[in-house]
Amino acid sequence: MRIDFTKMHGLGNDFIVFDASPRSAPPTAEELRRLADRHTGIGFDQALMLEPPRRADTAVYYRIFNADGHEVEQCGNGARCIAALLARRGAAARGEFAMDSPAGLIRARIEANGLVSVDMGVPDFNPAALPFEASAEAHVYPLDVGGNEVEIGAVSMGNPHAVLTVASAAAAPVDRLGPAIEHHPRFPKRVNVGFMEIVDRGHIRLRVHERGTGETLACGTGACAAVAVGRRHGRLDERVTVSVAGGELSITWPGSGKNIWLTGPAEVSFTGSVETSA
């Protein structure tokens, strides 16, 4: 099967975006892992597959596959790239438009400065939403990792996130704690792990170990999750700049029960085609 794709990225968090074939199934997990390889394939953090709208009030239905081939619920930077691509194709309404995903509806808009904003919904702190095994909802949870206890915040952004507050994001043990927390038995569907350094009330530094991918240069839902946890702890303001390895994202969250918006660049790297074994 031939796949025509667009390679895109949001601050280095990179994707292939392609249209679903009406004649064949999506690439298998093995094929996706092969394509994700940065030495022998195309290389990407996630593959984003576009399907025809399932609702009349939306521009597209999209599905997300991590580099390990597993399908996941949501991807913030991926949603921004899809919105930018639809706008380039003339396939989305001017102004604000809606897209559909396994995690539900996402509103998007192209800003006057060319940045792309997406409404990531209301952060859900209910442990069952992630899911996360806990006796009750709490602001902070102790978690035993290899005999050592760490404290996390836990929130669903349509996908599961654990957030640790650290003194220095640069010095955080992402390579060690990220995989250990991702596969912790209290997260039965695994989890994305963010390491947040609070610079001041309007600025954080963040590194994220993404479930099924590893550390990425940027993570949109991870940025939203970190700000939501920081806001819940009373340490951040409504508008926060999130510095990640690939650049800066902007998060706006008025607070509990309100929708959280993610803003940043979305760029096309190149287009191409590839043959899979299907």
Image (tube, rainbow, N blue to C red):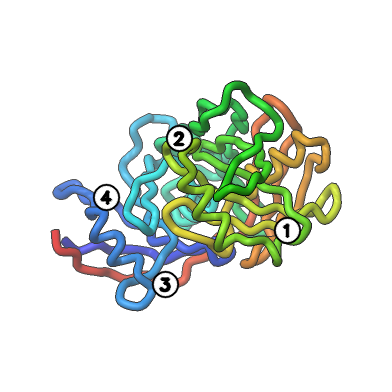
Q: Which secondary structure lies at badge 2?
A: loop
Comes first in the chain, label 4 or label 1: 4
Q: CA distance from mark 4 to mark 1?
A: 36 Å
Element type where label 4 sits in the image: loop
Task: Point out residue 144 in the picture as x, y percentages from the top left corner.
Answer: 59, 42
Q: Can the viewer see residue 95?
A: no
- Type of the residue with mark 2: Ala
Report which quarter residue 157 is drawn in. top right
Q: Earlier in the sequence, mark 4 or mark 2?
A: 4
The amino acid on which the numbered mark 1 sits, given as a three-letter code, is: Arg
Q: Nearer the viewer, mark 3 or mark 2?
A: 2
At label 4, the amino acid type is Ala
Question: What residue is at 57 percent from the left and 55 percent from the top?
Answer: 177
Between the residue at mark 2 and the residue at mark 1, the CA separation in whole angstroms equals 26 Å
Label 1 sits on residue: 205
What residue does disc 4 label?
Answer: 20
Kindly identify the amino acid type of the residue bearing the numbered disc 3.
Phe
Which residue has dot 3 on it? 270
Q: Nearer the viewer, residue 162 or 250?
A: 162
The numbered mark, 3 or 4, whose residue comes first in the sequence reads: 4
Residue with the mark numbered 2: 103
Name which of mark 1 and mark 3 comes first in the sequence.
1
Q: Is residue 41 visible?
A: yes
Q: Residue 170, percent across and down?
A: 70, 66
Q: Tell me whether the residue at label 4 lies in contact with that at label 2, contact meaning CB atoms closer than 8 angstroms.
A: no
